Image (spheres, grey):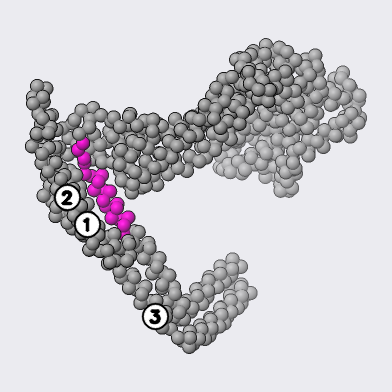
Amino acid sequence: MGYSKLVYDSVGRSYPRKNQYIVDLLKASPSEKKNIDKKSHPYIKKLEDFKNKEKDFLERIEKEAKEKFSNIENKKIRDLEETYYKAVQKESFYKDYIDLTYDAELEHLIAEREVMHIPGIISHDKDLHEQLKERSAQLANISQSEIDQANKEIAAKTNIRKEQLDAELKELDSKFRKKIISKTALKTEKKAKKRAADDDIKSYSYLNKKTAYEEDIKNIKHRIKMDFKSGINVLESDKSDIRRKTPIEVDKTKPLISYATALIPGLGQLLNKQYMKAIFFFIGTLFIYLVSIPYALGYGNYQGEGIQGLISLAQGGGRLDRSVIFLIEGIIAIMLLVIALVIFYISFKDVNTVEKGLIKGIRRKEWFETKQSISTDGFPYLVISPAAIVTMFIVLVPIITTVFLSFTNYDPNHQSKFQWIGLGNYATLFRGEGVAGMAFWPIVLWTLIWTFGATTLAIAIGFILSLIANQERIRFKGFFRTIYLLPWAVPAFITIMFFSQMFASNGPLTGLIKSVFGDTIFGMPVDIKNNTIQTRAILMLLQGWLGSAYIFLLTTGILQSIPKDLYEAAEIDGATGFQQTLKITIPLVLYQTGPLLIGQYTFNFNNFSIIHLFNGGGPFLPSTYGNVAGSTDILISYIYKLTIGNNYQALGAAVTMIVSLTLMFVTFLGMRDMKAFKED
């Protein structure tokens, strides 16, 4: 990046260079550039002379301002008086150097704004302090007799106003009894009358001069604070606007500071004279070199060895060292390093952007401008940053731990120390090998049957019931809707456990089935909880009933919002009731409930409670499912039994990964064409 003929401000406007040394370099040929000496160049000499004079001038007016206004007690006003005095002097001094450098032009323009704004701020502040002094004196001079007299007058007026309010309320009641006004109008008018009376009674309190003066003093103090702050903000905004529109010329042509200080966030900001920003990044530096990197190297770990512990998984460690702790602490070390890298990147990007801007001609932001930028453009990032950090540790760490565990041999034989085995667990599952893996494919098949069967049944029952309840010819709709919603209102686990008892070998419902169909159904003895086919059938029927209530409620709301004009037009065209349902009702319902219906399939895919509570995943068939699962277990209950019941944590993690990726993929396929999914 070399010199350009023009410089630019932060709003993109171009300006001619005032630095004649750089202009001469741009005009000269390569051979002529060798003869241009920077130190002896006339412009550089003028610029150095200006800087020397500027230094002496600033030291002199600083000293004069301190001496001239040292007797003012109010620090804020004293600082403003000093700034105004210096601004008057600067306006005159920099006027002679405007054509020499943009820095002098900027200082001249800023001085003009300070001369314009500061007298008004000081004058307004003095006026408010005079008002405060006057009110305080008036408050001190009020006698007790005046206060007592005012209180009597207030009490009298208050009583009169209350009597007036009572009369107004009685009149309203009379109008209501005579049916002149409605009940709603009565309530509204009464509220209005009471509010008006309260306002009047409150205003009477100001008849007491003490109360009035105290309120005035309170308001004046608030104005002193806020008006001064507002005036300063207006001045700073005006100065910032000038800075944005006044370019700068620098000698550098490459952003070297950003690269040289990349490993020490805050140092680049310090060299760029952005001191407040530097403080915040220096805190980030302390975090990186005192927390993140030491933890990653194993310092401060509970048992682990940081990143190295993630690799070794405590192999060769002490008897009490546990691989799972080494794994988790290694993952935490990665998270801390990620945060450190983010700080490095943000710091480097910030310094690099400022440097490139300076080379182009854009001035660095002052702290006032940075605060404004943070409060607008940076506000969303400030809000989400704490949540993002918390999410990393309470969401991402468990997820990454599950992913990593799926590549280990964390099983009943390796509870304390386990190793990395790559894709061994996935191979075991896909091949259906071993006591734990042999049940995988039968459970996958049943999980798919269960998901599509139970969910589709629930959707069908809920939709049909909502259609019936929405018919105009049906009476007592409220009663039927209440009945249909009961499965959703009653806690599901109570319902499931109730039916589990009812379908036991000697349960009432089992007895009812036997009395209707006999001791056998389709050649099978009626023994629901000990027969795989019968248990699966009852589970699907039970879930269909439990899930139908939500679908019923969802569909009823949509059916009631469908315009009747559509059905009337279809009827005129000769469409039958079935055709209207097929062509109008079902498409509209599916269009509006699509994402929620997909959610129902996802829910039932992971519906652990009904499988576990009804029959514990049984009946058990060791020849097909081994010792870790039953014939009605689905993948989620299979994971539970693998991990909690049999200590196959790694295998359970592998199944979890398969389930999660499958559900994410299916959900994506179902929602990718929806408008909400496509929107940014």
Residue 650: x percent and y percent? Answer: 66, 21
Query: Which residue bears the numbered disc 2?
Result: 56
Quarter of the picture holding the N terminus: top left
Query: Which residue bears the numbered disc 1?
Result: 63
Q: Nearer the viewer, residue 557 or 148?
A: 148
Answer whether residue 233 is magenta in the image: yes
Q: Residue at x 17, y 46 (%)?
A: 104
Which circle marks residue 138 in the picture? 3
- Image height check: is 320 above or below 283? above
Per the model, the C-alpha gap separating discs 2 and 1 is 11 Å
Amino acid type, residue under disc 1 in the picture: Lys
Residue 612: x percent and y percent? Answer: 76, 30
Extent of the magenta region? 231-250
Q: Nearer the viewer, residue 44 or 231?
A: 44
Q: Earlier in the sequence, mark 1 or mark 3?
A: 1
Residue 330: x percent and y percent? Answer: 56, 26
Q: Main secondary structure of the magenta part?
A: helix
